[in-house]
Image: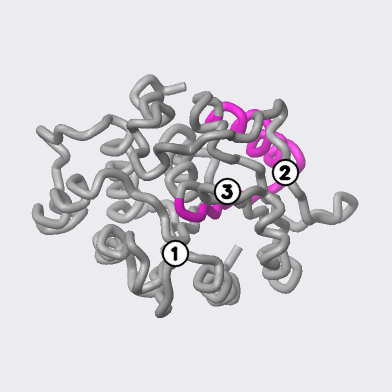
Amino acid sequence: MNPHLTALFIVSGLPFLAGCLGMAATEVPLPGIEIADTAARNDSLVIMLPGRGDRADTFISQGFEKAGQRRGFDTIAVDAHFGYYMERSLLPRLHEDVVLPARAAGYKNVWLLGISMGGFGSLLYATEHPDQIDGVILLAPYLGDRKLVEEIRDAGGLAAWSGEGSRFKDHEIGVWTWLQRATNTEAATPVILGYGESDGGAVAHAVLAAALDPSSVYTLEGGHKWTTWGPLWDKIAADLEL
């Protein structure tokens, strides 16, 4: 694992998660709920990472897999709960247990979909393994320290931000640096953002949204909850070209 990313997995590196007790045990391999016809797989797979307090089966109870069934792509909801972040095992488990087997199974397009904490986990994976991911869908993602977001905004936006002299954690700077490359190069990795306009993280989301093509940004009135994310995912999936 890239040593610059390991600080993520210290509780102080994700302050909004502090105080989480009684975490579920981690497993090897990383469990997941796959919705695919193994005898006739689609060409594309969307790997779904949950937010804090949710598990893989929450995606199923919220009907997120139905978009793939309608639109002709497969899905796997992975049980990447907070314990994997705390044990510093999220990235290797996601890579070895989910992404590499998906490539070996013949998937030509592999996308990540992350909600809240899962959005940050998706970005960390894309930073660590950029060649393995064909696109990232972020629903109300956690995007790091609020003051870092303000620094990027005050620099004139993501394209103008240099990152030099930033006093923030390496993994957070790394995520925003990857986003800068992904949104500012000809061979850009597609990044799709969806969030509720009343979400507590909407200020950070707006900074990222300003760097994206408007067609890649989806908003609805709503807060940081599934009743907002479900309709956003339905809209995104309807437009998704995999």
How far apart are the alpha carbons under marks 2 and 3?
10 Å
> Where residue 196 appears, x then y in whole percent?
40, 71
The residue at the point 35 percent across, 72 percent down is 198
Which of label 1 and label 2 is nearer to you?
Answer: 1
Residue type marked 2: Gly
- Ranked by sequence position, the earlier of labels 1 and 3 is 3
Image side of residue 168 versus residue 236, left or right: left
> Where residue 240 appears, x then y in whole percent?
56, 69
Give yes or no for contact between labels 1 and 2 (Cβ–Cβ under 8 Å).
no
Q: Residues within 10 Å of mark 3 (few under 14, many from 20)?
A: many
> Where residue 215 appears, x then y in whole percent?
39, 74
Q: Tell which of 186 and 144 is nearer to you.
A: 144
> Where residue 176 appears, x then y in whole percent?
29, 45
Residue type marked 1: His
- Ranked by sequence position, the earlier of labels 2 and 3 is 2
Q: Give the range drawn in magenta.
A: 90-116
The residue that label 3 is drawn on is 49
The residue at the point 37 percent across, 38 percent down is 14
Total marks shown come to 3
How far apart are the alpha carbons under marks 1 and 3?
16 Å
- Ranked by sequence position, the earlier of labels 1 and 2 is 2
Badge 3 marks a residue whose secondary structure is: strand
Find out whether residue 98 is within the magenta segment. yes
Q: Residue 224 carries which label?
A: 1
Badge 2 marks a residue whose secondary structure is: strand
Q: Residues within 10 Å of mark 2 (few under 14, many from 20)?
A: many
The residue that label 2 is drawn on is 32
Q: Which mark is residue 129?
A: none
